[in-house]
Amino acid sequence: MISSIFFHDVLMISSKTPPILGSRIKLPKHEPQSQQGIEQYLQCLAQARNDNEISIDQVIQHLNFSRRVIEDMEKGDLSFVPYPLNYFFARQYAQYLKVPFPEQYLMTHFKPSEKK
């Protein structure tokens, strides 16, 4: 009787398919609750720039962004440049500041909400 229970348990364990080596496990992405989360992130980039004592002029020289673009982005204004360029500008700015860009922020999240 003991051997049949053991055999049954072994069959139950072995019937589960193991992950294939080299396959990627997809974890669910946690999307930002709203565009407000992205706006707050953009404002945090301003704080990171100030904390690292990087002037706007240095950013302009390195990234070739206009002063207006940088100031609007740091205010959290998603319309600082047209969509989808705002997504790429924000990623590039975060990379320059060495601030991790959250994986859950997708390009579509940077689309400004339509005003009614």
Image (tube, grey):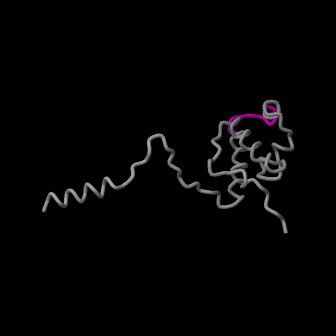
Image coordinates of residue 35 in percent, x first then y, are 72, 58
Using residue 31 as the reference point, say whether residue 35 is left or right of it.
Answer: right
Above or below: residue 70 compared with residue 83: above
- Residue 33 on the magenta segment: no
Using residue 62 as the reference point, say whether residue 21 is left or right of it.
Answer: left
Quadrant for the C terminus in the image: bottom right
Give the residue displayed 53% in from the left and 50% down from the top: 26
Q: Nearer the viewer, residue 9 or 80?
A: 9
Give the residue displayed 39% in from the left and 49% down from the top: 18
Quadrant for the N terminus in the image: bottom left
- Residue 56 on the magenta segment: yes
Q: Based on the displayed image, in which of its 4 quarters is residue 13 positioned?
A: bottom left
Image coordinates of residue 72 in percent, x first then y, are 82, 48
Q: Based on the displayed image, in which of its 4 quarters is residue 58 positioned?
A: top right
Above or below: residue 44 compared with residue 36: above
Above or below: residue 64 compared with residue 73: above
Give the residue displayed 84% in from the left and 47% down from the top: 81
Image coordinates of residue 59 in percent, x first then y, are 78, 34
Give the residue displayed 74% in from the left and 34% down from the top: 54
Q: Magenta residues, as a range?
A: 50-58
Image coordinates of residue 73 in percent, x first then y, are 79, 47
The furthest residue to the bottom = 116
| Figure disc tally | 0
Using residue 98 as the reference point, say whether residue 112 is left or right of it.
Answer: right
Q: Nearer the viewer, residue 66 or 7?
A: 7
